[in-house]
Amino acid sequence: MLPTTVMGWNNDKAMAEVAHVAQHFDFLAVQELMDPAALGQLEQAIEGASGEPWSSMASDDLGRSSYREHYGFLWRESEIEYDRGAVVFLDSRDVFAREPYSAKFTALESGQQFAAATVHVVYGDSVSDRLPEIEALADYWQWLEEVYPGTPRLLMGDFNLRPSHEGWAELRDLGATPAITEGATTLGTTDGVWSNLYDNIWHSDQAPITDSGIIQFPDLLPGNHTAVRDSVSDHAPVKWLNGCDQPS
């Protein structure tokens, strides 16, 4: 998963460096996409870096105010194929500021299908502002099962809440498990300092993990921690892999 990058504003994001990090994955979910054209630019940059064809898709813009985001998915065509069902959650209770986005894909080597969903939980002024969306993810998890019945589910995003928080109780009770339970995914403003385990991949029992972790991407790039924090992202990608060669 390629987390918060704020792509699409004139903010000097180093697309070649973002692509260099992104090519280490076969499938990515992107949050804070401000302009879908930026996702197309990233796709082209990854193709140049990897020498392989990639595909991408983006949601409509989502948000309650003038601040709006898109979600996106990118995938390596030799490994992943889009199946069907790209859809924004129909949030009848209007809990989410930016409703989750999902689609169904197939891992070509194994033939394993999976439902990928992504969300950027509102940060607010305190943890209490985040809990309504976190708690509503339990309903969303069940909705994903209805939309993609019998399909392993992956819920990827910037949740702005550590996975050990009690706010996740309802989702855990439904059998969802976080891929990452230790470490930190946000880059501090001091070189080498990391904080907050906010980025994660929650998965169903049908999608067991054989490997997971946090990609400390400053190690992959020239420049120091604080420089790439500004030019690439202030969040690190998290990865997930199972025995059927499902996506990272």
Image: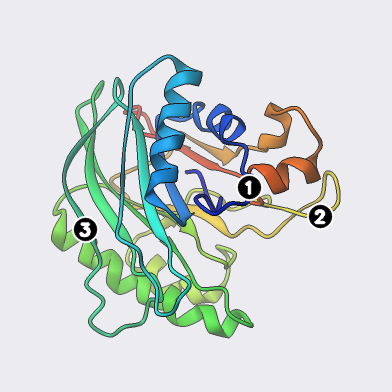
The answer, for residue 38, to whether it is visible in the render is yes
Three-letter amino acid code at disc 2? Thr
Which of marks 3 and 2 precedes in the sequence? 3
Q: Nearer the viewer, residue 44 or 126?
A: 44
The colour style of the image is: rainbow
Please, is residue 220 above or below residue 59 in the view?
A: above
- Classify residue 111 by image quadrant: top left
Q: What residue is pinned by disc 1? A: 233
Which residue is found at the position 41% from the left and 66% from the top?
172
Disc 3 secondary structure class: strand
Please, is residue 115 above or below residue 34 in the view?
A: above
Which residue is found at the position 72% from the left and 41% from the top?
228
Three-letter amino acid code at disc 1? Ser
Q: What residue is pinned by disc 3? A: 87
Q: CA distance from mark 1 to mark 3?
A: 26 Å
Residue 165 drawn at (x, y percent): 57, 71
Please, is residue 93 above or below residue 48 in the view?
A: below
Residue 40 drawn at (x, y percent): 38, 38
Q: Quarter holding the C terminus?
A: top left
Residue extending farthest to the right is: 190
| Callout 2–callout 1 Cβ contact below 8 Å | no
The answer, for residue 241, to whether it is visible in the render is no
Q: What residue is pinned by disc 2? A: 189
Residue extending farthest to the top is: 51
Three-letter amino acid code at disc 3? Val
Which residue is found at the position 26% from the left and 76% from the top?
91
User: Around disc 1, counting alpha carbons within 10 Å, would you say few (fewer than 14), some (14 to 19), or many (20 or more)?
Assistant: many
Q: CA distance from mark 2 to mark 3?
A: 36 Å
Q: CA distance from mark 2 to mark 1?
A: 12 Å
User: Around disc 2, counting alpha carbons within 10 Å, would you say few (fewer than 14), some (14 to 19), or many (20 or more)?
Assistant: some
